[in-house]
Amino acid sequence: MEGFVFPNETHVTWSVMIVMYPYITGLVAGAFIVSSLYHVFGFEQLRQIGRFSLVSAFFFLLFAPVPLLNHLGRPERAFNIMITPNFRSAMSGFGFVYAIYTGIVFLEIWFHYRADFIDRWNRAKGLPRKLYYLLLLGGTTRTPETDRVDHAIVKTLAGVGIPIALVLHGYVGFLFGSIKANPWWSTPLMFIIFICSALVSGVSVLIFLFQFVTWLRRIPVDQAALDTLARFLWGFMIVAVSLELMEILSVAYEQTARWAVLKDLINGRLWFTYVILQILICSLVPFLLLAVRNLFRLPTRVGNFLIFISAGLLLLQVLLMRWNVVIGGQLLSKSYRGFTSYLPGIWDKEGLFVAALILIIPFLLLREFDRLFPFFTTPTREITQM
Amino acid sequence: MMTHATHVLRVVLVVAALGVGGLAAQRLLKPASFGEVGHYRKDSVYEIMSHEPVHQGREACAECHEDIHALHDKDIHYGVECEDCHGPGNLHVRHHTEDTPTVSEEEALMPMEYTLEGCLFCHRKLAARPTNFPQIDPTEHYKFLHVTDNTTRCIECHSPHEPIYLLAKVNEARIHPVIHQCEDCHDGKPEKDHREVEGHPVIFTCRDCHKAIVEDFETHEHAFMDCTACHLFHAENENAGRIFKNGNGKFCLLCHEKKPFKDGEAVPQIVSSEHLAEMAPDLNMTPEEISHHSRACLDCHFDFIHDSELIKKGVIVDVQ
């Protein structure tokens, strides 16, 4: 503790769990937008990664509320926001947006994989056959016409899903941005910054996994898809980081009382995690690497390596951004004259181990899904060109 | 077209069923009186009103624990309720008052565990707390008192029931004025503002009124301490507060009692029971009598603090 801190500010209430929550929803929103680039905006080169990103979005989505539930002392009460909804509350809105969005992503996956399910149903025997039948809701007919219908529905759901994905993630930024008593959070730009960084983290995680899996399995990487993603990543990160810095610059230029305290926060408590790690190492370095990769002709292996490093650093950048926003805002006393401190425990209920576990489980589920329906092999399922 | 979309129809039906099911579940799960008078369950108000209070209040404790209550009531923690530290006493009271107890002995036990956080909840040093409220940074406090073991518990030295060992009841301690307005010292409003008078204090400290005593104190061994370490001042309002004069030997022993967790070389330390027994004949007392003599330390060692001759003249106020 340093300076003038009110007694009720010594404890940082929103722990690392509240850092994980926007991070995971960011991965969801980002991955979903990438899938939509193929399904809605016609980026054919992202065909293979389109379904991978869609399923990734779904598994991350399943785990997005887990940190919140773990943070609550009485998690079963969380459902009250839907049983007795208060429509003037942003948090209440989250319950409905989350439910609708999960439904949309699930349906999109269902329609996307329906052909695969029918194929499996045809080949399976016994209980799996019954389960596939149940999953298909008894609709086992597949013709070029049904494929066209499915494709049209996938495209529609992907289109409808984009604004909902943005609302789902934007809501988190909106919540922080509307806490007017906190000078580090209170800005209408917050939700835009959150959405932009969500896109960065979503593209990063896909690139990271895509390259990691192809390297692990010694299969050739889909260079066209990777190049497209790398260009998008560069673009998204430029917008996200510029917005973050411009927001700070604007506060600094105003030279109000708000800056007097934020300056001390940035130069003190957040110096290492914000200035050194988030801005210098995890933003500037990937910006330069991606610039070199996208502007100059490099050997493919070198170029891909630069993309891989950049994606890894940008994944960290977004995690650090969430940390610096969520924790940073709570380190500051409302007196504007003091700072508290926070260090998460390793084995605590809301500690680092649990945080890592919540983040890792979606990846394990993706691995299991990949065993059933491999992402990165050439599908033989086409009846029509989808 | 429709034959190609029968599977879509099934999905629509499932989604619609889920939607209707969700709405039905919401209707079913929504508490009966919710929303009648606001965004809460009206019945909850009556349920809360019907709860039996779990906290019993200090008078209930005093009925059986009169000795501890009297000690607690006398000292500076008198404003802290017993149940603030020991937890709610409803089961304890019920067990000990019912003819045929319906509460087991285990359920009736009151928590008495010590936790550092329990004390620091009020006494952790925070710039936001009033400066005259006793507060510590544990590391600095241990350093100041030459405590070598940083796991030492507060209660090894301080008694929560009698934290500053007052000789009189705390709310009977002498009222001390706070110099607040010109008329507190001057007859009528002075002609000049205090800023126009050279050397006029802006905030009055002990030295401004008790110059002789303070200057004498500074020639003694305890000069490194603040006056308020022993003469703890508790502001009651803007104009006055109470001075607690600690003449009790137990207060001296906070620093001077030999303890295994202290650096024995740092300040003179004694084993009080042995030292008092040894000194009893010099004071014409039996060991039993001296153990109950609160001011025993000051009887012999007063001159380590103040010049006894100066103090005998009474409280010297020498406002210039």
Image (cartoon, coloured by chain):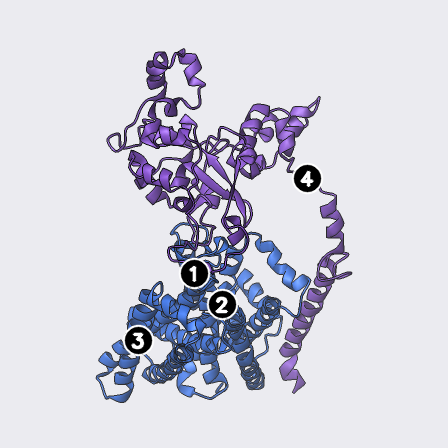
Chain colours: A blue, B purple
Pointers 4 and 2 within a single chain = no
Q: Earlier in the sequence, mark 1 or mark 4?
A: 4
Q: Are marks 4 and 2 in contact (CB under 8 Å)?
A: no
B267 on left or right of A51: left
Say which chain tag 1 marks: B
Along the viewing direction, whichever of B262 and B174 lies nearer the viewer: B174
Q: Are marks 2 and 3 in contact (CB under 8 Å)?
A: no
Say what amino acid the circle numbered 4 marks. Pro
Quickly name the residue at label 1. Answer: B195
Residue B309 position within the rendered picture, expressed as x and y whole percent measured from the top left: 36, 28
What is the CA distance from the residue labelled 2 to the residue labelled 1?
40 Å
Quickly name the residue at label 2. Answer: A182
Under circle 1, the secondary element is: helix
What is the CA distance from the residue labelled 4 to the residue labelled 2?
38 Å
Say what amino acid the circle numbered 1 marks. Arg
In terms of image quadrants, where is residue B228?
Answer: top left
* Mark number, residue B53: 4
Say which chain tag 3 marks: A
Q: Earlier in the sequence, mark 2 or mark 3?
A: 2
Q: Do we see residue B181 in this rendering?
A: no
Residue B108 position within the rendered picture, expressed as x and y whole percent measured from the top left: 60, 29
Under circle 4, the secondary element is: loop
Quickly name the residue at label 3. Answer: A310
In terms of image quadrants, where is residue B264?
Answer: top left
Q: Are marks 3 and 1 in contact (CB under 8 Å)?
A: no
Along the viewing direction, whichever of B277 and A381 lies nearer the viewer: B277
